[in-house]
Amino acid sequence: MPTYKPIEPGIRIKASASDLLAFKWETNGIVADFIVPDDNTRALRVSFDRPCIVRLLDEMPLSTEEDDTPVEGLVSDHFAYRLEGARFARMQSETWKEISGPVTHYQFVTGWGCMDVVSGGQPSFSLIARSD
């Protein structure tokens, strides 16, 4: 059973009103920009500066794995989590996890999608100017 541990991105984001705006692979990490609800001028940037395994899903996927229910620790309309015991992280290459480790599984939830990240790095959050 996975355990969700909410993390705070430094700005209150109503997850159901947010969505992924952009995703970019970097040399040693990723950058993802998310909608800040009710703010057309700024986006929330989530970045990792270490190698990552990423899964992007285009629907609210909190119960897509059969053995991942029930879940513990979900907070209504919360955006960012650290996960323990979820199938996605368990199924990744043991060799990659050892080389990159210790690794942690993170999940970023919006009303239209979900981004899972397994990385030896921690997420960095920043507000940026939105370039729609």
Image (cartoon, grey):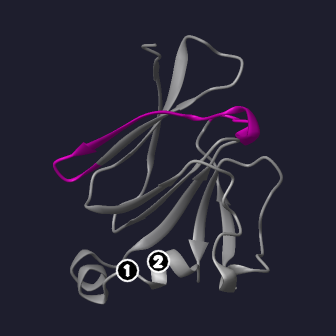
Left or right: 34 with respect to 79?
Answer: left
For residue 74, above or below residue 38: below
Quarter holding residue 32: top left
How much space separates mark 1 and mark 2, taking CA atoms?
6 Å
The residue that appears at 69% across and 24% down in the rendered structure is 37
Q: Secondary structure at mark 2?
A: helix
- Confirm whether the magenta stretch covers residue 17: yes
How crowded is the residue under tag 2: few (<14 C-alpha within 10 Å), some, or many (20+)?
A: many
Quarter holding residue 40: top right
- How far across and down, in percent of the image, does residue 26 sit? 22, 44
Residue furthest toward the right? 76
User: Could you say which is closer to the camera, residue 36 or residue 102?
Assistant: 36
- How far across and down, in percent of the image, does residue 100 sit? 25, 74
Magenta residues, start to end: 11-29
How crowded is the residue under tag 1: few (<14 C-alpha within 10 Å), some, or many (20+)?
A: few
For residue 110, above or below residue 108: above
Label 1 sits on what residue type? Gln
User: Could you say which is closer to the camera, residue 48 or residue 56?
Assistant: 56
- Confirm whether the magenta stretch covers residue 130: no
The residue that appears at 66% across and 33% down in the rendered structure is 18
Tell me, for residue 89, which label it has, or none: 2
Label 2 sits on what residue type? Ala
Left or right: 63 with respect to 96?
Answer: right
The residue that appears at 53% across and 18% down in the rendered structure is 42
Q: Badge 1 is on which residue?
A: 92
Quarter holding residue 84: bottom right
* Quadrant location of the N terminus in the rendered image: bottom right
Contact? badges 1 and 2 (CB < 8 Å): yes
